[in-house]
Structures are given as structure tokens and as C-alpha cells.
């Protein structure tokens, strides 16, 4: 997540990057949301490319 936010280089994310530990402590990645959702791994070097994850997700949604 840090890599993605850093590479995105959006001005609104300056605080997050400067205060990463404080920001990251507010993000719950252990418990999935109660609602239906899809988890996408957008890390650099993810085992499955973002394009392939998107293709798989769309296939599931459209079937």
C-alpha cells in the first residue's frame, strides 16, 4: 500500500506518507468488510498482475 501511494504521488497523500505508522495503524487489513467485496493485490511485483486480477474479477461478476 505504501508503494502504491508513494508512486501515485497525489498531493492529498502527503500526510499519509509523512506519518505512515500513524496512518497504517488506522487501516484494518485483517478483517474483510461485512459486505461483498473483492480484494486486489496492487503491490509492485504481485504474484498475479493487476490486469489478470481485473480480468478474473470481471469474469466472475459478469457470469
Image: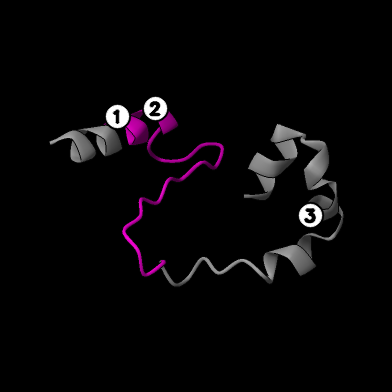
Q: Main secondary structure of the magenta part?
A: loop
Q: CA distance from mark 2 to mark 1?
A: 6 Å
The answer to whether the residues at label 1 and label 3 have Cβ atoms under 8 Å apart is no
Q: Which residues are magenta?
A: 33-55
Side of 31 where 21 appears, left or right? right
Please report the residue visible at 69 percent of the width from the left and 43 percent of the height from the top. Answer: 5
Name the colouring of the figure. one colour
Q: Quadrant of the C terminus?
A: top left
Side of 53 where 21 appears, left or right? right
User: Residue 2 location in percent, x, y?
Assistant: 68, 49
Please report the residue visible at 35 percent of the width from the left and 36 percent of the height from the top. Answer: 53
Callout 1 crowding tier (Cα within 10 Å): few <14, some 14–19, many ≥20: few
**Mark carried by residue 13:** none
User: Residue 18 location in percent, x, y?
Assistant: 87, 54
Callout 3 crowding tier (Cα within 10 Å): few <14, some 14–19, many ≥20: some
- Residue behind mark 1: 55
Q: Can you name the residue that lies furthest to the left here?
A: 63
Is disc 3 placed on a helix, strand or loop?
Answer: helix
Q: CA distance from mark 3 to mark 2?
A: 27 Å
- Residue behind mark 3: 16
Quadrant hosting residue 12: top right
- Residue behind mark 2: 51
**Is 33 drawn above or below residue 61 in the view shown?**
below
**Is 15 drawn above or below residue 47 in the view shown?**
below
Is disc 2 placed on a helix, strand or loop?
Answer: helix
Callout 2 crowding tier (Cα within 10 Å): few <14, some 14–19, many ≥20: few
The answer to whether the residues at label 2 and label 1 have Cβ atoms under 8 Å apart is yes
Is disc 1 placed on a helix, strand or loop?
Answer: helix
Amino acid at each position: 500500500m505504501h508503494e502504491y501511494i508513494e508512486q501515485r504521488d497525489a498531493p492529498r497523500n502527503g500526510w499519509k506518507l509523512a506519518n505512515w505508522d500513524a496512518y497504517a495503524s488506522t487501516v484494518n487489513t485483517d478483517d474483510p468488510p461485512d459486505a461483498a467485496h473483492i480484494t486486489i493485490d496492487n503491490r509492485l511485483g504481485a504474484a498475479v498482475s493487476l490486469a489478470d486480477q481485473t480480468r478474473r474479477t470481471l469474469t466472475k461478476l459478469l457470469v
